[in-house]
Amino acid sequence: MQSDASIIINLKLKVTSKICPFCSEPVKIHGYYPRTLTHSTLVNRKCNIVYRQRRFICPKCSYSFNEHNPFTKANDGLTHETKINILNDLKHPEDTYTSVAERYHVSKATVLRLFDKHVNIMRKPLPMVLSIDEHYFPESDMDSLYCCLLMNFITGEVKDVLPSRRKHYLIDYFSSIRGDIQNYTLKRSELNNVKYISMDLYDNFSSEPVPESFIVSTNTINSLFKDKKWLEQYAPAIETQ
């Protein structure tokens, strides 16, 4: 028990006979090195394991390796149980990345990386009327200050959130959907279900090749003008269509 009420557990595993995985000769202990692991099973206080991990060496072929342990993987600072606890808590809609990070005494970036690595949320089907817009997102890991929102224009339901609105990312995204053919006889993909697109005048949205060259069946492109002058200029023409 530390002065800040945190807990540090010092341990090493029982030594067992080891065989060299290359030459099958018996190996000997080459030394120990400490690994500090975050083991957040006690939510009300911080807990670390200082694990003295053995390293073995083969006297015959000089191959060296670490002993296997049940706590974590190589070069990882979180125990398996900590990861499971974090991922389980992220299932609750009321929990945020920040709140889970504080609860398990890790950084928000660690929680984000863990979520991105182990969670794959399936994209929802594209609607008949697709709305494409950007949203300011400075926390993005994609070297982009804006993420791209794909929504159902009629219902407002979010269909997908892309981490970047950059042209090369959008091209890759729509290309992957176009490549997933649903009807090989008609050579139709999910993109053929989109009949209308609503988007602003951001160049990556409104200029070729994104998204018109991918959604070839689109009949009308409705541009949502955020600028008041644009709206005043084009609103009468839109109303008459």
Image (spheres, helix red, strand yellow):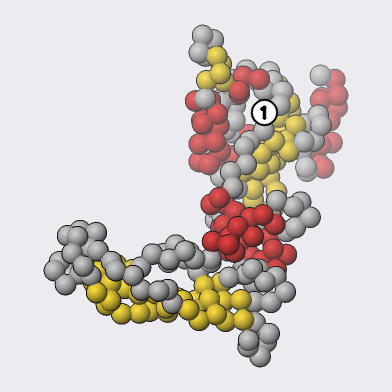
Q: Using the rendered view, name the quadrant where residue 234 is placed.
A: top right
Quadrant where the C terminus is found in the figure? top right
What is the x, y in percent for residue 224?
76, 35
What is the x, y in percent for residue 239?
86, 24
Tag 1 residue: 126
Between 94 and 152, which is closer to the camera in this rendering? 94
Between 149 and 101, which is closer to the camera in this rendering? 101
* Residue 224 seen in render: no
What is the x, y in percent for residue 129?
73, 26
Q: Using the rendered view, name the quadrant where residue 228 is placed.
A: top right
Would you say 142 lies left or right of 74 here? right
Between 99 and 52, which is closer to the camera in this rendering? 52
231, above or below 76, in the image: above
* Residue 20 seen in render: yes
Q: Using the rendered view, name the quadrant where residue 203 is placed.
A: top right
Q: For the point 53% across and 65% down, which residue is it? A: 79
Would you say 84 lies left or right of 34 here? right
Quadrant where the N terminus is found in the figure? bottom right
Amino acid type of the residue tagged 1 in the rendering: Leu
Which residue is situated farthest in the bottom direction here?
3
Q: In the structure shown, which secondary structural element does the residue marked by tag 1 occupy?
A: loop
What is the x, y in percent for residue 132?
69, 36
Mark 1 packing: few (<14 Cα in 10 Å), some, or many (20+)? many
